[in-house]
Amino acid sequence: MGLLSTVPGATWGRLVARHFAHAARRGERPGGDELSRLLLDDLVPTSRQELLFGLSPCLLALRAARRYVARVLLQAGKTGLQGERAELLRMAEARDIPVLRPRRQKLDAMCRYQVHQGVCMEVSPLRPRPWTEAGDASPGDDPQQLWLVLDGIQDPRNFGAVLRSAHFLGVDKIITSRRNSCPLTPVVSKASAGAMEVMDVFSTDDLTGFLQTKAQQGWLVAGTVGCPGPKVPQSSEVPITSSLEFLWDRPTLLVLGNEGSGLSQEVQASCQLLLTILPRRPLPPGFESLNVSVVAGILLHSICSQRKGFPAEGERRQLLQDPQEPSARSEGLSVAQHPGLSLGSEEEAK
């Protein structure tokens, strides 16, 4: 039996990670031969943990430090680590987190064949916080506050895509209904490109009561419906307006409904306005609505484009023509600081 087989996997992972950090300080590339010496397939299951997968979710989870991380799993077969993978390994070493090197087949099975990009972590679950912890923001504090409220979003990929758009476009807070809603799972985190790891998500058992309370405080409660048609209930109590005609002049709660049934009757009755996206052509029956994550992206961009400080048309054209100017870099900081949150990330496809 060789010497390496007598060293526990967790201890060896910490020793190798520490060596990587020293090598980085000397200007050497982390990984290389040392990576090949990490123990293979030493994966005794850990209890009460979930498996976070994907480079951006794992990296952002380490940066945010909101989860307990039991182990980092890096796919075997890599000859070296560069860029964000090297940063992830250094952060794991700094927090004394064991690093193991399972084979691709093992990671595939552990992730149930999701796209993991060769990076996984065993972590404690994230849970939404009670909405009472969101703070009592007064409408007078900032007339252009925007909270996104999700009424019964159940598909984890839809949920993740909505979180990604909300983070990208500057939504202030996310509120979900605790009942009939998707939890904060690793699939949600991957679909959000890790935005779930850095955003505060709140929840409530009484969504109708929450909306009514905020309306009494002076907030506008704006729900969403499909384009007007025979299946969209017309109500004189709740007017419907095109998203293109919406003027954002006070703090607003934008409420999105379930993928199939839309807003519940109680929630819709609590809205003061219903926004809709009008189609550009006549539609056959069954095509009157869009996917909820697409709706979120369209409406949030339409609303947030009205925010003070959002680049005007001339400024946007200048940013596109000369992206290296300091003004362009400052506008892009919120994306650059969170890898994988920029649109069209190539890393997600790997």
Image (spheres, grey):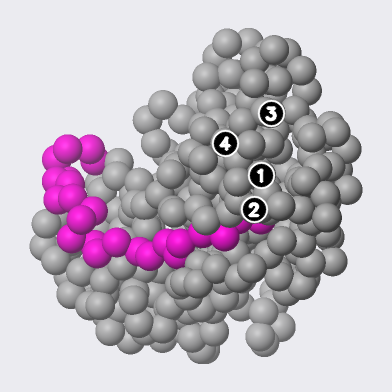
Asked which quadrant contains residue 45, the reply is bottom right
Which residue appears at 54% of the width and 45% of the height? Answer: 97
Q: Earlier in the sequence, mark 4 or mark 1?
A: 1
The secondary element bearing badge 3 is classed as helix
* Badge 1: residue crowd in 10 Å (few <14, some 14–19, many ≥20): many
Badge 3 crowding class, 10 Å Cα cut-off, few under 14, some 14 to 19, many 20 or more, is many
User: What residue is at 66 percent from the left and 44 percent from the top?
Assistant: 12
For the point 79% across and 56% down, which residue is it?
Answer: 40
Q: Quadrant of residue 82?
A: top right
Secondary structure category for the residue under label 1: helix
Question: Mark 3 = which residue?
Answer: 20
Can you tell which mark lies on residue 12? 1
Q: 322 above or below 116?
A: above
Mark 2, residue position? 8
Label located before the other in sequence (3 or 2) = 2
Q: From which residue to which does the magenta span run?
A: 119-143
Residue 243 lies in the magenta-colored region: no
Check residue 93 in the rendering and tell me which mark sits there, or answer none.
4
Residue 139: percent from the left, percent from the top?
A: 17, 46
| Disc 3 + disc 4, Cβ < 8 Å | yes
Would residue 6 be visible to someone looking at this image? Answer: yes
